[in-house]
Amino acid sequence: MEKVLESRGLWFAYDDDYVLEDISVSVDRSDFVAIVGPNGGGKTTLVKLITGLLQPTMGTLTVLGGPPAKAGSRIGYVPQFSTMDASFPITVLEVVLQGLFHKSMIGPAWKRDAVEQGLRSLEQLGIADLAGRHFGQLSGGQKQRTLLARALVSSPELLILDEPTSSVDIAVEEDIYELFKELNSVMTILLVTHDITFVSSYVNKVMCLNRRSACHATEEIALERERIAPYGHKVTEIRHQCGL
Ligand SMILES: Nc1ncnc2c1ncn2[C@@H]1O[C@H](COP(=O)(O)OP(=O)(O)OP(=O)(O)O)[C@@H](O)[C@H]1O
Ligand SMILES: [Mg+2]
């Protein structure tokens, strides 16, 4: 079966220094993968390569059977930091509709359908009441949920989330993870997180990334958790166990 994501010997450098070295990853349909690792380990860089925002320096990377730039709306992406100017007068619904910009925007019928899709996506995230608000005036958590709605509005096959819940409270975080679990029945999910303890019951693979990468099945993580739990360490320490 076609892999959702496959990289072989992938290297990437911003300038002269490599921040990713010899990354080989393979992700199947319906995988839910957590990407963990220290600050500066290369997680966001890898995500930008997968979404086609950066090009590999060496090696191969295939997303949904082709080059990343060709995957377009088949990928939904929630970036780690929003680069949107807070003073730009754009409503929450308009932000969500940006997720449909790739589709041909012809005629009023398209617009009606798009608005319906946008509102449905906001409902999924429990923020339909914010549709007409200015994006710049929202709280951090409301912004994050809006960006999630934008990533979901095109019903992507691959959803990529770079620390998507870092500014939502714990109750909302649990709701969002329940939503991810539901979505995982119809889409593959890659999730960058620092909280492997929290996500380990949702994901089936964990990729440790610190310039180089190593992949684990979640059963391995569960065993590791049992092994280190009595000592009160966090499961994130697994990255040291795998030599990264
Ligand atoms: N645009 C850039 N130009 C030059 N170097 C960069 C650029 N973006 C990131 N880097 C460097 O690449 C390395 C990896 O950064 P990256 O943002 O991928 O890490 P990360 O794992 O996402 O970290 P965090 O957990 O803090 O989000 C870091 O050393 C960073 O300083
Ligand atoms: Mg990052």
Image (cartoon, rainbow, N blue to C red):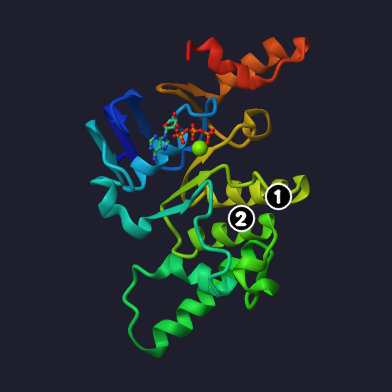
- Name the image quarter holding the N terminus: top left
* Residue corresponding to mark 1: 168
Nearer to me, 118 or 59: 59
**What label sits on residue 144 in the rendered view?**
2
In this rendering, position of residue 16 left or right of residue 166: left
In this rendering, position of residue 153 left or right of residue 70: right
Compared to 33, does 116 lie above or below?
below
Q: Do residues under tags 2 and 1 come within 8 Å of each other at their CB atoms?
A: yes
Q: Tag 1: Cα neighbours inside 10 Å, few (<14), some, or many (≥20)?
A: some
Residue 60 in which image quadrant: top left
Q: Position of residue 171 (x, y in %)?
A: 77, 49
Compared to 147, does 6 lie above or below?
above
The kind of residue tagged 2 is Gln
Q: Position of residue 16 (x, y in %)?
A: 28, 26
Which residue is at a point 34% across and 71% down the rendered structure image? 103
Q: Position of residue 93 (x, y in %)?
A: 56, 73
Residue 4 seen in the figure:
no
